[in-house]
Amino acid sequence: MNNNKSILSLFAAAGILLSTNIDAAEVNLRFAHFWPANSGIAQTLEQWGDTIEQESNGRIGVEIYPAQTLAKATQTYDSVVRGIADVGATIQGYTANRFPLTQIVELPGIVKSGEQGSCVLQTLYNEGEIANEYDESHVLFMFTHGPGHLHTQGRSITKPEDLNGLMIRRPTVVVGELLKGLGGEPVGLPAPEMYSAMQRGIINGVTLPWEAMASFRLNELADHHTEVGLYSLALLVTMNKRVYERMPADLRKVIDDNSGMKWAERLGAAYDRLDQVGIKQARELNHSITVIENGAENPDWKPVLDRIAEGYVSDLTGKGLPAQQIYQRAKALSSVCL
């Protein structure tokens, strides 16, 4: 697999012909995502690509474009739909209001870990509860990261009032509503832009799982952390429908064999392992880490979070969507998937 687009470009510019697995493959898949190339999640996605290449005996080549080199984080899903990328991994909430039923899993209390949350989300998709939101692409698998926490620079958050007036990066509109209800000022930014925004003082903190604090080097800037389990994001790996449908049946089977729950849980488990890397790094830097007793169920936090969650579900129900049914199913799966 060739993961270095810039090196390929240099060779091409020099007129040098390269003989690679990509060139020899019958099907070449351009895989776009936003994680830094050296991050643990990027490496897990590379393992998926390696598996596809191996199980197809080299007939499928996978070229990975990390760190937004092929498509911006907020445009990855549409880039796959339009064929700019053949495969893409992204966060559904980056495409605002496109996947409202899927984003129910972002609400507090549903996701306990990356692997468990991935089981919840993939099951909702497999059962058809949220499948209609993905008619434009061929979904390979869905997953979640572990609980998302608060990470701030120079100040500690122990209760909701401590967030009053603070500019906090939110990954999606749903998480923004949670922050707003708690008194914070949500700022929408894709993950790759967080570091410079905090470095320049545009934001006071971020909402992230521990994994991202290491992957995006935010532990270099945020020195106070509050473990509260505020949310978890829905993510997916999806494929251009036309590319998938034009593949020979035996190659489609290779893709099918590496879709669904197996890879969903593998990505979730990778997040769980990488969470330990992020928190270990913060401890080694002697950061302040506040653990909220019972997390989102803590009486200081629960009333606000419950009100916002119920408001989100009620709003979708008012638009004629089966949000209450999916919310109840997600909460039931939260226990089943443990």
Image (cartoon, rainbow, N blue to C red):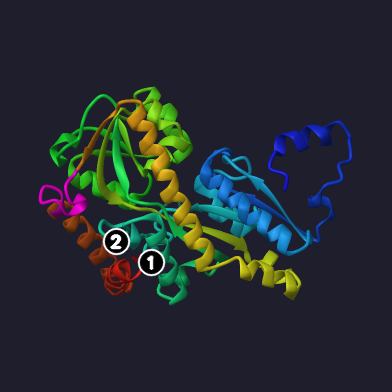
10 left or right of 231 in image = right
What residue is disc 2 on? Answer: 110
The residue range painted magenta reads 292-302
Residue 325 appears in the picture as rendered: yes
Q: Which residue is drawn at 21% across and 31% down?
A: 156
Whole-Å distance between the Cαs marked 2 and 1? Answer: 8 Å
Instruction: Determine the secondary structure under disc 1.
Output: helix
What residue is disc 1 on? Answer: 120
Q: Residue 191 carries which label?
A: none
Crowd tier of the residue under label 1, counting other residues whose Cα lies within 10 Å: few below 14, some 14–19, many 20 or above:
many
- Tell whether position 271 is magenta: no
143 left or right of 167 in image = right
Relative depth, front residue between 197 and 288? 288
Outermost left residue? 299
Q: Do the residues labelled 2 and 1 touch (CB within 8 Å)?
A: yes
Height in image: 160 above or below 146?
above
Relative depth, front residue between 217 and 316? 217
139 left or right of 328 in image = right
- Tell whether position 293 is magenta: yes
The image quarter containing residue 108 is bottom left
